[in-house]
Amino acid sequence: MILDPQIAKTNLTRIARELGFDDCRVSRAREATHAEAYKNWISDGCAGDMAWLERNIDRRVNPTEVVPGACSVISLALNYFPGHEDPDGDYRIARYAWNEDYHDIIEAKLKDLNSALEDMGGVQRFYTDTGPVLERDFATDSGLGWSGKSCVQIHKEMGTWFFLAELITTLDLPPDQPFGDHCGKCTRCMVACPTDAITEPHRVDARRCISYLTIEYLGPIPLEFRKQIGDRIYGCDTCLDVCPWNRFAKISRETKFHARQSVFQNRLRDFLELDDESFRIMFAKSPIKRIKRNRFLRNVCVALGNVGTKKDLPALTRAAGDEDALISEHAAWAVSEIKARTEA
């Protein structure tokens, strides 16, 4: 049974709230506002090694190619802010990865919401950054915040600390109104970026981005960026941290996003003792597990090269003999950096 559109919209909003989403808004299913800009970004090589972003471009820029007969895009926000205070530790991990993988948490909610929409007569596809859709364009069209100069979505109540998810649906739901761009003349995110990855407002060169280099990039970290990575071992929150809209942020109701003590009780050098099995155990249900041991220890070695001391040298020397070349090369680099810094 297909409900009256306004009744369906009211039911949608209520169910989304009951499932734990912090905002739910609707836009028209049509070609994305920045479709051409996205195609140019891809052609300029700014996606780096993320080849999947180059596939299915027609589907990615137009949700009606994903769901035939699609009328609406439902954009959802889930607050993940675990608080301003960092866990104890001599390293930094992006806040979204402090505990359980958001994909698992959000997809369970999306399945329930999809079932409710099917009962209303809709046909949907749903994603949380796992499918071909320019989600920030449709979130912005719906009034669920706006895309900041760092390309991070900003919400008037949650700041930058939220996940986006969306359902493309055949239901013809009343659209919401855009909120508009409220960055003004602020350039804090651009100025703060350690590697100058935000090359101009609303354009990020992934090849320079610490989040890309520590998560998506498969190879050795380029020498020109190793020092700028500092003590970061998974992702980077710098452009989020400095956003003035975060003064409105509130701590997430979802405890599964709060810091996992079994991880943060470790010092940097402790991670070098992980074998494949202990890595999988430590990061079970964590987004960190997907970069596997070799890339994670690559990142740990870079951080130790930047902030480590002589006490870290024995662990790094052992890591320099690891059979995985990605680990051994970065460990050897870290050893040389610590020695140069402490013996000067």
Image (tube, rainbow, N blue to C red):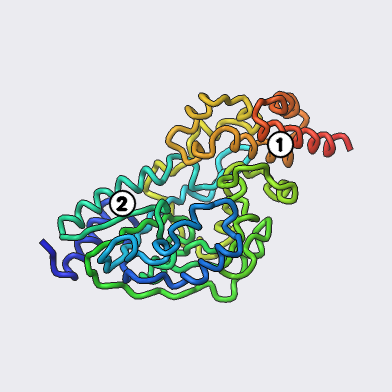
Q: Please state which of the two labelled residues, at mark 2 or mark 1, is closer to the viewer.
A: 1
From this view, report whether residue 6 is shown above or below residue 265: below
Neighbour class for label 1 at 10 Å: few (<14), some, many (≥20)? many
In the displayed structure, does residue 313 sit left or right of residue 4?
Answer: right
Q: Quadrant of the N terminus?
A: bottom left
Q: Name the one closer to the observer, 133 or 85.
A: 133
Judge from the rendering whether residue 16 lies leftward or rightward of residue 309; answer left or right: left
In the image, what residue occupies the spot 58% across and 66% down? 203
Say which amino acid is labelled 2.
Answer: Gly
The structure residue drawn at horizontal position 54% and vertical position 39%, both measured from the top left corner, is 291
Label whose residue precedes the other's in the sequence (2 or 1)? 2
Determine whether 167 is above or below 279 in the image: below
Residue 168, image x, y percentages: 30, 61
x and y, in percent, of residue 104 in the image: 37, 43
* Residue marked by disc 2: 20
* Type of amino acid at the residue the image marks with label 1: His
Mark 2 crowdedness (10 Å alpha carbons): few <14, some 14-19, many ≥20? some
Q: Which residue sits at x=27%, y=63%?
A: 68
Classify the position of the C terminus by image quarter: top right
Report x, y in % for residue 328. Answer: 70, 31
In the image, farthest residue toward the right: 344
Q: Secondary structure at mark 2?
A: loop
Q: Tell me, yes or no, whether the two marked residues, 2 and 1, touch with CB atoms within 8 Å.
A: no
Q: Residue 302, located in which quarter of the rendered image?
A: top right
Name the residue at 56% across, 45% down: 215
**Residue 330: mark in rendering:** 1
Q: Nearer the viewer, residue 39 or 185?
A: 39
The circle drawn on residue 80 is none
> Camera-side residue: 69 or 210?
69
257 over 266 or under it: above or below: below
